[in-house]
Image (cartoon, grey):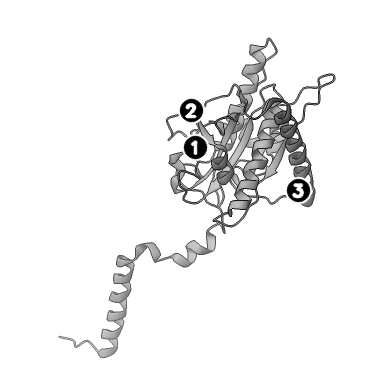
């Protein structure tokens, strides 16, 4: 019988040790590869992995956003001076559920457009042509695969919403088009001051958009890590989220927004979420709304 040399024993020992390490620690076997491909600070967990790539705002974008916020805050101050705080708006909205993990963006858009179309019919107007999800996916540049599947923020959201949910030209009435508004995009955990400021800005922007009437709904892009009940918009997203929802109203007395939810793993088609929760959940991305 052949005797195993010492060098062979050493090789066998190394090989066995390597196998044992892989068996004991499989989650860390390829940690280097995982770290190399992981997004730096974006999160896309659960069923929804559909919010694509974040595009930072340009200087012009930020200047326009500042003007929009200033106009919205002026409107709210004047409203509260004459009517006091409170008030609510609840638009019509679509309630379709998405059928893929990457197409929450097109479904959020479709639900927003469906609401506007139903409103027009209810007041005796001509209904909008509500485009199929595939058409909206093409317009929004939604990807079904690759390193970052889903719909980018801001991407072509503004163009898509103004194309398929256009604002009317009314004599004597200034109807503002859809615009993107970026959150502060602070590293987690976001500080209280930034959180409160974004929440206050969003409140003004949403009130201006919804109080103008005509049933134009908003789009919100949530993107966050694990969260608590004072942060997430729905308990399904407590472990993190990368998702789009349609916002179709607010109640200022209760301090909540109305959400149309396309996630098929959430039974509710609509629900409410506190102002601060939607602000926390969108601070890494933003919203698309009129005004």
Regarding mark 1 in the picture, which secondary structure is present there?
loop
Q: Which residue is mark 2?
A: 269
Mark nearest the camera among 3 and 1 is 3
Image location of residue 257, percent across then percent down: 57, 32
Left or right: where 241 falls relative to 138: left
Q: Quadrant of the C terminus?
A: top right
User: Would you identify the image quadrant in which residue 76 lies?
Assistant: top right
Q: CA distance from mark 2 to mark 1?
A: 16 Å
Q: Which residue is mark 3?
A: 62
Mark nearest the camera among 2 and 3 is 3
Image location of residue 159, percent across then percent down: 73, 36
Q: Residue lying farthest right?
A: 172
Q: Which residue is mark 1?
A: 100
Front one among 110 and 194:
194
Left or right: where 170 falls relative to 230: right
- From the viewer's perspective, is residue 127 above or below residue 175? above
Res. 137 in view: yes
- Residue located 56% across and 46% down the image: 280
């Amino acid at each position: 019988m052949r005797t195993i040399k010492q060098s062979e024993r050493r090789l066998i020992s190394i090989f066995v040790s390597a196998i044992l390490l892989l068996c004991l620690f499989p989650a860390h076997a390829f940690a280097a590869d995982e770290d190399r491909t992981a997004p730096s600070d974006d999160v896309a967990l659960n069923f929804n992995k559909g919010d694509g790539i974040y595009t930072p705002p340009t200087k012009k974008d930020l200047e326009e956003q500042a003007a929009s916020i200033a106009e919205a805050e002026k409107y709210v101050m004047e409203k509260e001076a004459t009517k006091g705080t409170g008030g609510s708006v609840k638009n019509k909205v679509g309630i379709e559920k998405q059928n893929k993990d990457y197409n929450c963006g097109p479904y959020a858009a479709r639900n927003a457009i469906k609401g506007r179309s139903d409103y027009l019919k209810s007041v005796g107007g001509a209904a909008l042509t509500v485009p199929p999800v595939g058409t909206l996916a093409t317009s929004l540049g939604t990807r079904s695969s690759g390193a970052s599947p889903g719909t980018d923020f801001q991407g072509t959201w503004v163009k898509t919403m103004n194309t398929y949910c256009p604002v009317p030209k009314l004599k004597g009435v200034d109807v503002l088009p859809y615009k993107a508004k970026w959150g502060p995009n602070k590293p987690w955990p976001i500080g209280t001051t930034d959180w409160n400021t974004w929440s206050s800005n969003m409140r003004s922007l949403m009130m201006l958009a919804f109080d103008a009437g005509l049933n134009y709904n908003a789009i919100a892009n949530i993107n966050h890590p694990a969260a608590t009940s004072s942060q997430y918009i729905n308990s399904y997203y407590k472990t993190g989220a990368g998702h789009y929802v349609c916002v179709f109203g607010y109640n200022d007395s209760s301090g909540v927004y109305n959400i149309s939810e396309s996630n098929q793993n959430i039974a509710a088609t609509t629900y409410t979420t506190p102002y601060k929760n939607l602000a926390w959940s969108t601070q890494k991305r933003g919203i698309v709304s009129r005004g």
